[in-house]
Amino acid sequence: MNSPPALPTRATDPQARAVRLGPRSLAALVLVSTVGVVAFGWPFLAPPASQLTAHAQDAPWLFAGLLVLLVAVVGATISESGLGAKAVAMLGVLAATGAALRPIGAGTAGIEPMFFLMVLSGRVLGPGFGFVLGSVTMFASALLTGGVGPWMPFQMLSMGWFTMGAGLLPGVDRLRGRAELLLLAGYGFLAAFAYGTAMNMQGWPFMDRNASSIAFDPDATVAANVARFVAYCLATSLGWDLGRAVVTVVLTLTLGPAVLRALRRATRRAAFETQVTFEAPRP
């Protein structure tokens, strides 16, 4: 007598991730991040006599082209390692939502509600998905607002780091409730300042040093340029960064519980990593 066919069962994972960072995608991400650190920090890395400072006006375009290519490599590698149809759909929805949120406070003292959504999405969906989401969202918002220029790859990379960092926070399996919200709010507050500082580093070296005493001076020492950069941040972007940080904290504490529940429910239903297995029926 033939046995009845085996029944399919599903293996569940309470912490399923839309994108898992495998060895190749992790190596590509490290490569992009390394190039990004050099692209942002070259004024402090290059000595005063370096030929790099002599071509400072060419740097934004050279680094922009390289970063776009490297970010594309990371996206392709992560896609190859498991960005399935359901993950692509989730990525599209969240990226479109983030891009639509960004213009709400454009030009108004750092009121940028997209940052809180990036923090919560990175927390729930993990660092791999977070990096892709942050980069794609910033790219989409740049197209939406007309903010396309040599700064855009730097924004994409910074937002990718910002969102990925939320996925690397501790307690993803255990921390819930008020403690988790406070952790995310604290991270969002600090990361908002870090994002603004990184973007300051992208534009600061190209100020006319004859027009301002806080502009980058290729002939000055590293310590002197650090002092100039700190003064530049305090004078130009502190208010904007503080507004972004406060808005991120307020939205995380007020809307965070509902958004986290919705993201976790959507992740469970999507079952990104669900695998169908077969086992023999019980006698």
Image: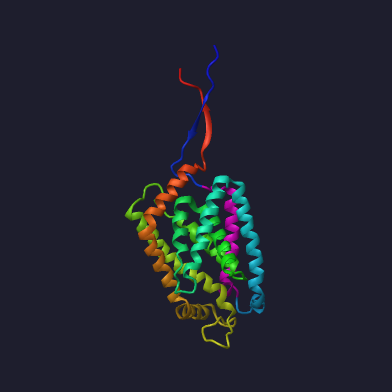
Q: Front-most of 157 and 117?
A: 117
* The N terminus: image quadrant: top right
Colouring scheme, one of rainbow, by chain, secondary structure, one colour: rainbow
Q: Is residue 169 above or below residue 103?
A: above
The picture quadrant where one finds residue 146 is bottom right
Residue 14, by quadrant, is top left
- Residue 79 visible in image: yes
Q: For the stretch drawn in magenta, what is the main secondary structure?
A: helix
- Horizontal and vertical percent position of residue 228: 50, 81
114 is higher (above) or lower (below) than 12: below
Q: Does the magenta run of residues contain 185?
A: no
Give the residue furthest to the bottom.
210
Q: Can you see residue 24?
A: no
Residue furthest to the left: 178
**Image quadrant in which the C terminus is located:** top left
Left or right placement of residue 218 versus residue 126 in this view? right
The residue range painted magenta reads 18-46
Residue at 48% x, 63% y is 101
- The residue positioned 61% from the left and 69% from the top of the image is 148
User: Which of 267/216 is in front?
Assistant: 267
Residue 210 against residue 240 in the figure, above or below? below
